[in-house]
Image (cartoon, grey):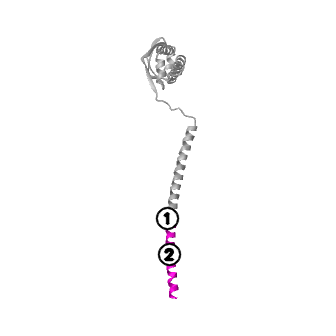
């Protein structure tokens, strides 16, 4: 009987190393599976963020492009305009320094060719004003708006574009 006991022992000893090998294989497979899931999950979430960013970019580009305003360019007209008035029997004078505001240098250069016509229009506009109305801030603003409209009309006629955004009075003296 002693021989029978010895025989099952080697079979049991062989089963233990095979069981240990299976356990090691299962652990290695579990570790590889965990690493694979970790890498896959990371890739999924990062690609989802990139897709969201791409969708946001697509939404932004799908919207109509809003033109970016260019920097303002100012052109001082010198010398200053001086006009005379006859107000209540007295000689009165107005001196006004003018600057043109635009955002397109090329169009402004095209308008500079017509500067004598522009200056003539402004002199005629300024000299045709009522001196009494120019004494009020509203009167001065109305004159500025009329000057802007006159310059824009000339620019449209001569260059094909409005060119000048505003006419600004940098100095206005009434005497």
Can residue 5 be found in the magenta stretch? yes
Against 110, residue 37 (above or below) is below
Asked if residue 171 shows in the view, the reply is no
Q: Residues within 10 Å of mark 1 (few under 14, many from 20)?
A: few
Please report the residue visible at 47 percent of the width from the left and 22 percent of the height from the top.
106
Q: Nearer the viewer, mark 2 or mark 1?
A: 2
Sequence-earlier tag: 2 or 1: 2
Q: Which residue is mark 1?
A: 28
Label 2 – label 1 distance at C-alpha: 18 Å
Across and down, in percent, residue 1 comes to: 52, 88
Q: Nearer the viewer, residue 88 or 59?
A: 59
The magenta-colored residue range is 1-26
Q: Which residue is mark 2?
A: 16
Q: Nearer the viewer, residue 121 or 85?
A: 121
Magenta-colored segment: predominant secondary structure = helix
Element type where label 2 sits in the image: helix
Across and down, in percent, residue 133 comes to: 51, 19
Asked if residue 159 shows in the view, the reply is yes
Can residue 74 be found in the magenta stretch? no
Please report the residue visible at 49 percent of the width from the left and 64 percent of the height from the top.
28
Q: Quadrant of residue 174?
A: top left
Please report the residue visible at 49 percent of the width from the left and 70 percent of the height from the top.
21
Quadrant of the drawing holding the C terminus: top left
Q: Quadrant of residue 60?
A: top right
Across and down, in percent, residue 72 comes to: 46, 28
């Amino acid at each position: 009987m002693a021989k029978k006991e010895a025989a099952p022992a080697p079979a049991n000893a062989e089963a233990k190393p095979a069981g240990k090998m299976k356990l090691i294989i299962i652990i290695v497979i579990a570790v590889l599976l965990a690493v694979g899931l970790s890498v896959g999950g990371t890739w999924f979430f990062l690609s989802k963020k990139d897709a969201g960013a791409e969708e946001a970019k697509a939404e932004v580009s799908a919207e109509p492009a809003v033109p970016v305003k260019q920097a303002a360019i100012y052109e001082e007209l010198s010398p200053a305009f001086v006009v005379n008035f006859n107000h209540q029997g007295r000689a009165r004078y107005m001196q006004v320094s003018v600057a043109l505001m635009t955002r397109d240098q090329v169009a402004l250069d095209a308008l500079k060719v017509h500067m004598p016509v522009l200056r003539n229009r402004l002199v005629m506009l300024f000299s045709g004003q009522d001196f009494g109305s120019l004494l009020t801030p509203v009167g001065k603003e109305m004159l500025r708006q009329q000057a802007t409209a006159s310059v824009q009309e000339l620019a449209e006629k001569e260059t094909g574009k409005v060119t000048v955004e505003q006419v600004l009075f940098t100095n206005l003296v009434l005497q």
